Image (cartoon, helix red, strand yellow):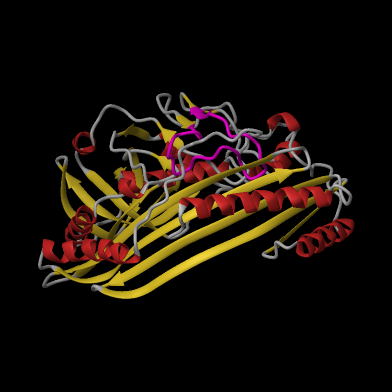
Amino acid sequence: MHSIQEIKNEEKFLLDTVKNTLQIAQNKTTAIEVFIKKIIGISVNVRNSIIENVQFNSDNTLFITVYNKFSKACVSSKDFSINGIKNMLDTAINISKYSSSDFFSGLPNLQLLCFRALDLDLFHPSELSIKNIIKLVTSSEQEAFKFDKRIVNSEGSFFNSHMTINVFGNSLGMLEKYTSTRYSTYNCMIAQDSNSMQRDFDYSVARKINDLEKPETLGKSTATRAISRLGSQKIHTRKCPIIFSAEIAHIFFSHLANAISGDNVYQKSTFLINDLEKRIFPKWLNIEEKPHLKKGLGSKPFDNEGVSTQYKYIIKNGILKTWLLNTYNARRLDLETTGNAGGIFNWIVSYNDISFRELLKKMDQGLLVTELMGQGVDIVSGNYSRGAIGFYVEKGEVSYPVNEITISGNLRDIWNDIINISNDIDIRNNIQCGSIFVSEIQVSGN
């Protein structure tokens, strides 16, 4: 583990490297972006109390983007020496001379840049030793074995810790940085009875190591989940109500992020091309982007182009309020960047004052889906088809586990048919959402 002083020294070195690169570039080109990303991390993998892997990594890369009039060139290198930087700049400039001209290429507008990065409380270094990390991951696995004799094997217990230093500068005078930490634990166990064998997992993610789920709690949760899937049955093909549990519900909104991304919009390769300022969700549903949440897993002071991130509504009263744009695709659409170069930053999906158990009671009979498989999503048409695993619900109670089913429909219909979202918010993702109750979806089984 690195000390605080070592990290501060590394930050200063990377800032100086970006500053030097910009100074060297002054006599070579008029428009340039320089970005350095350094990741320092450790991962530990334990299986059946045996250490399978301990991996350290310390990786840093310098990215240079040159705009030569309307031609663009990008190069990257791990050589931070002065000669290495000069060679990178020369290479980028030469490439730009042979790149096709694109009127929409160029740096963001000056007034949109972040010249004072907010402190978002993302950096929480830990002094945890390798010995303690191994004890942590072993404990969750051992707790799962102790929980029930039907837990017969392990697919592994993992711990990951990463510290990331981001430094960004450009020829418009911006030079900013932010440093973050991210910790995660994961546990996957196998349960067996006289008739079947099933696996399931659970995990925890946080910016601060003390905010992770306790290993004992994680082990018990994983064991409970694996055991609950024993005796899975198939069901007949039907249309029925479905609840998507909070742990997977965010996936349906990640499809929204893809459908409204600038590249898909300007290329007209999204089924939502004509839906800006139109209702695509129930009137009560809102999605807010909050990039400045303290310790948020998706928090960032600026995007990948140095543009300040901003609070905004994605969906308001069911209405689509914005595309997700970087500078290039914004110009293609004759709009302004939304500060989403590089993705989305903390989407908060609204929910109602109803618990998950109350949501089950409200559904009464149908499917509770806890895992989705496959990639059967077509953003051009909105058609949706994926394998699913979960539980059949009768009289508002979980009755038995089900597997080997496929759910299908169209995203437009699925979104519009959302009846309720419960308050069991899963905060482990960039999209935070409770469990979703959808009135009816096609389910294919036997």
Q: Residue at x 86, y 49 (%)?
A: 29
Q: Position of residue 190 (x, y in %)?
A: 22, 68
Q: Quadrant of the N terminus?
A: bottom left
Q: Position of residue 54 (x, y in %)?
A: 39, 71
Instruction: Tell whether 320 sits left or right of 211.
Output: right
Instruction: Tell whether 162 sits left or right of 25.
Output: left
Instruction: Tell whether 415 sits left or right of 172.
Output: left
Q: Judge whether residue 299 can be spotted in this image.
A: yes
Note whether 114 is above or below 78 in the view shown: above
Point out the stretch of residues depicted in magenta. 289-315
* SS majority, magenta: loop
Say if the magenta span includes residue 339: no
Note whether 224 is above or below 256 in the view shown: below
Say if the magenta span includes residue 291: yes
Q: Position of residue 181 (x, y in %)?
A: 45, 50
Q: Judge whether residue 71 can be spotted in this image.
A: no
**Looking at the image, which is closer to me, 426 or 238?**
426
Q: Residue at x 39, y 30 (%)?
A: 350
Q: Residue at x 30, y 59 (%)?
A: 445
Q: Residue at x 29, y 43 (%)?
A: 243
Looking at the rendering, which quadrant does residue 437 occupy?
Answer: top left
Instruction: Tell whether 143 sits left or right of 212.
Output: left
Q: Quadrant of the C terminus?
A: bottom left
**Looking at the image, which is closer to me, 176 or 75?**
176
Note whether 16 is above or below 176 in the view shown: below
Q: Position of residue 306 (x, y in %)?
A: 66, 40
